[in-house]
Amino acid sequence: MGSFSGFIDRNTQRSIAVQLEGALLISTDLFPYFVLVALEAGGLLRAVALLLFYPIIWLLNLTRHRTAALHAMIFISTFGLKIHSIKAVAKATLQKFFLEDIRESSFKVFSGYGGKKYVLTRLPRVMVEPFLREYLDVNCVIGTELKVIGRTCSGLVVPTGADRAEMEWFQALKVACGDDQLIDVGLAARSEDRSFLLLCKEHYVISPQEDASPLARKDYPKPFIFHDGRLVTRPDPIRFLAVFLWFPIGVFLAVTRVLVGIVFPYKVALPILALNGFRIRIGVPVTQKETDPKSVVESPKTKGTLYVCNHQTLLDPVLLSTAILRRVSAVTYSLSSFSEVISPIPTVRLTRDRFKDREIMRSMLERGDLVVCPEGTTCREQYLLRFSPLFAEIADKIVPVAVRARGGMFYGTTARGYKWLDSPFFLMNPFPWYEFNLHEPVSGRPDSKELCYDIANGIQMLIGKTLGFECTNLTRRDKYRMLAGNDGIDQRN
């Protein structure tokens, strides 16, 4: 049995089989992935039930009853759920955490093979297959099969699945590759079942401490742009316990921060927010030189200033207003009634009719300053979506604003969940922060429609350069089709 350390194979046409947990992934702990399924597909109470049951799961694993522990996690996290909900979580949420846990050395070996690729895992196949096929070009996934009645998960597994120890993987892989065919190379974790290596010509075993560096983001097999889910970090037992204990404190903080924003004037609200952990920073105006879309501002024909921001959360316009100490209005495509009620600034919904929306925005500019986010939706990663050029048609004075926001525990955006909880979740973070970088004004309302596109693209490039983000031509529709299976129009409030 060979040593994995320093192994490089140059025959790219050979086949390879690898274990997911412990070999391709650094961690062997399955608990975080079941917590994510329980939380995102089943709700908070189901995830808490799984957390409360964890001591028993830990004891079962300790006494080498790993199959029983796996079955318990599957039952608690999937019983009664629709199978399409689990598939949606696998595609929208789990991929982020799989990518962050890939072992760099294993990935370099695995990706170097052009032959048939097999991955074996104890996780339910439905949870891992979207990631493995989309990002790693895997041909065959051998994993635990959930027992589904109609379209509903029973919480049980198909007896022939790969959830059992010893020779189950051997038999499943033998069927997958053919009775008389051997796989060229096999990678296995030292702590996991290695019976399938009997079907491999070459064996390489990885110890938990060996080459445990995660794959760098720049080395991901394809750009990772969209994902969903509320939790920022991988919910291992200790971290998820911390989230659970923090939750009531976070709710109190969120309510307090909302009340501060509504009741107090800007100059008073800023220091109070800073005292309870919320940081808001505004950068010095940046002079554009290389990517200036149009630097000369003519005499304005509209009374207000149009602030054009990249979109981080629903709080962008509110916190920009607080940061610049000026009252502004905001327009949005999707805003819940709850968010409208708690918003300290005026908000108006757009209709998605270009002519009506143009008149709405123009009339608001006649009454004062206006904030727009021309991406039309948020993006969590370091990418900018395509900027709609509509804003360039209606404003004489445009101020580009580069926005960066972070929360260490919860995401304040969602594609599949309840939109009205977006702002509360962001405000529940222990130390959320916002940064605004205002650029010098540029002029809008050009003579031709083509110039409007030039202005929109130029401002997108300007903001992207300031933030270090990559500009794309992706749209709101692309995001929602990937994460939620719709066009992002009829979302739940």
Image (cartoon, rainbow, N blue to C red):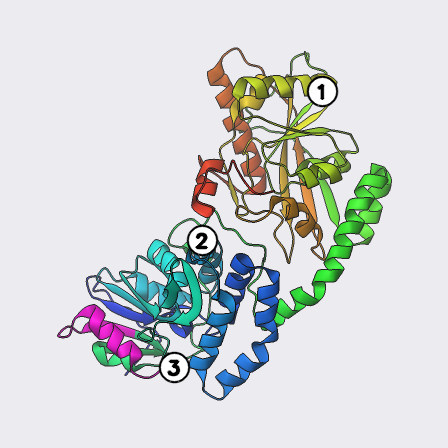
Which numbered disc flags the more N-terminal residue, 2 or 3? 2
Tell me residue 416's x, y (percent): 52, 48
Q: Which amino acid does label 2 sit on?
A: Ala
Which picture quadrant has residue 177? Answer: bottom left
- Which mark is first along the chain, 1 or 3? 3
Q: Quadrant of the N terminus?
A: bottom left
Q: Is residue 458 above or below residue 414?
A: above
Looking at the image, tell me whether mark 1 or mark 2 is earlier in sequence order: 2
Q: Residue at x 72, y 39 (%)?
A: 319
At 32% from the left and 84% from the top, the residue drawn is 166
The answer to which of 156 and 88 lies nearer the viewer is: 156
Count of numbered tags: 3
Q: Is residue 53 visible?
A: yes
User: Which residue is pictured at 36% across the width and 60% down the height?
Assistant: 129
* Residue holding disc 3: 190
Badge 3 element: loop
Residue designated by label 1 = 304
Give the extent of the magenta segment. 165-186
State the SS at label 2: helix
Asked if residue 169 is among those painted magenta in the image, a careful observer would answer: yes
Farthest residue in the front direction?
Answer: 150
Q: What percent of the width, then of the height, locates residue 31?
A: 51, 71
Q: How far is disc 3 from disc 1 in space, using C-alphas?
A: 66 Å
Which residue occupies 54% across, 17% down?
355
Residue beneath label 2, please?
A: 88
Point out the image quarter for the C terminus: top right
Residue 253, located in which quarter of the rendered image? bottom right
Label 3 sits on what residue type? Arg
The image shows residue 487 at horizontal and vertical percentages of 46, 37
Q: Position of residue 296 (x, y in %)?
A: 62, 17
Task: Give, as a three-letter code, the residue at label 1.
Answer: Gly
